[in-house]
Image (cartoon, rainbow, N blue to C red):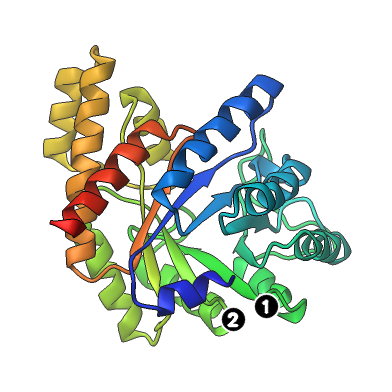
Amino acid sequence: MRIIDRLKAGYPVFSFEFYPPKTEQGNENLWNAIRDLKSLQPSFISVTYGAGGSTRAKTRGLTSRIKAELGIEAMAHLTCVGSDRAEIKEIVEDLLAGGVENILCLRGDPPKGESAFEATEGGFSYGNELVAYANELNVPCVAAACYPEGHVDSPTLREDLHHLKRKVDAGADFLISQLFFDNRQYFDFVDRARAVGIDVPIVPGIMPIGNFEQIQRFTKMCGASIPEQLLEELEKRKEEPQAIHELGVAYATIQCLGLLQGGAPGIHFYTLNKSTATREILSALRMHARL
């Protein structure tokens, strides 16, 4: 089923992002984590592509398996990194043959050890080009990424929004945002996007904080910021892993409630391949909806 159809139905969409592990034990742990989510009826699960496209085969296999064995809708990530048009065509055709109808098109990060993105000869330089090509290949539903605080490579928010408009004009059906911790950033971003004619659903991306040092690394890499008050509370608990987990779950739950009440079409959880925190948050959200 096309994810855009679920978004258009008007009910909140809850989804989870995982990445292919490097080891067999990691694969087993991941499958258990995904299986544990099934009872919460996630709208879809997305599978990342790995740095530099390093896990492309695992992404295809895991995405198809999620849909075939668990009956959960799945979305595969696809990047411009390391592939020319012919290789991307082969990957897309393989995904479609495996029953995957939804693809998230990204420019992608530079391969490990490289500081700047360089297009593969015969490939694509920008996410909007990959979006357009996916539509040429008749992918039923094409998604793209957006950045409430701006992409790290964009000098201004205005230029970043210009690039996003090109993705939507190229045929992106909906957008998933980079993580953020201040809901005002999301709502302000949506207002700016609507003002330039971007009218597709924009799903906010939320990452529950489970590790203080880890979230500092992630926010530095992706250009997201941590509100000062939250940072102070994390600093107080940085030697207490359970306290960090509890604060992360509580903060993300409040964030999600505020987003949904403000009109967000759903929540996309960045899980880091762990389902405990996101299960707790989604259970709380579903309980709140029944009250």
Residue 88: % across, % down: 80, 62
Secondary-structure class at tag 1: helix
Work out which quarter of the rendered image holds the N terminus and state it: bottom right
Does the rendering let one see residue 182?
no
Residue 44: % across, % down: 51, 57
Picture quarter containing residue 279? top left
- Left/right placement of residue 59 relative to residue 150 reads right
Residue 4: % across, % down: 50, 75
Q: Is residue 116 above or below residue 100?
A: above
The residue carrying mark 2 is 171
Q: Residue drawn at (36%, 43%), measured in percent from left and top?
A: 207
Q: Is residue 217 above or below residue 104?
A: above
The residue carrying mark 1 is 132
Q: Residue drawn at (45%, 42%), measured in percent from left and top?
A: 37
Question: How many other residues sit within 10 Å of disc 2, few (<14), some (14-19) or many (≥20)?
Answer: many
Question: How many other residues sit within 10 Å of disc 1, few (<14), some (14-19) or many (≥20)?
Answer: many
**Residue nearest the viewer, comparing 174 with 87:** 174
- Left/right placement of residue 236 relative to residue 46 reads left
Does the rendering let one see residue 123?
yes
Q: Residue drawn at (46%, 72%), measured in percent from left and top?
A: 6
Residue type pointed to by label 2:
Gly
Residue 127: % across, % down: 61, 66
Residue contact between numbered discs 2 and 1, judged by CB atoms under 8 Å? yes
Residue type pointed to by label 1:
Ala
- Cα distance in 3D space between marks 2 and 1: 6 Å
Q: Residue drawn at (61%, 41%), measured in percent from left and top?
A: 115
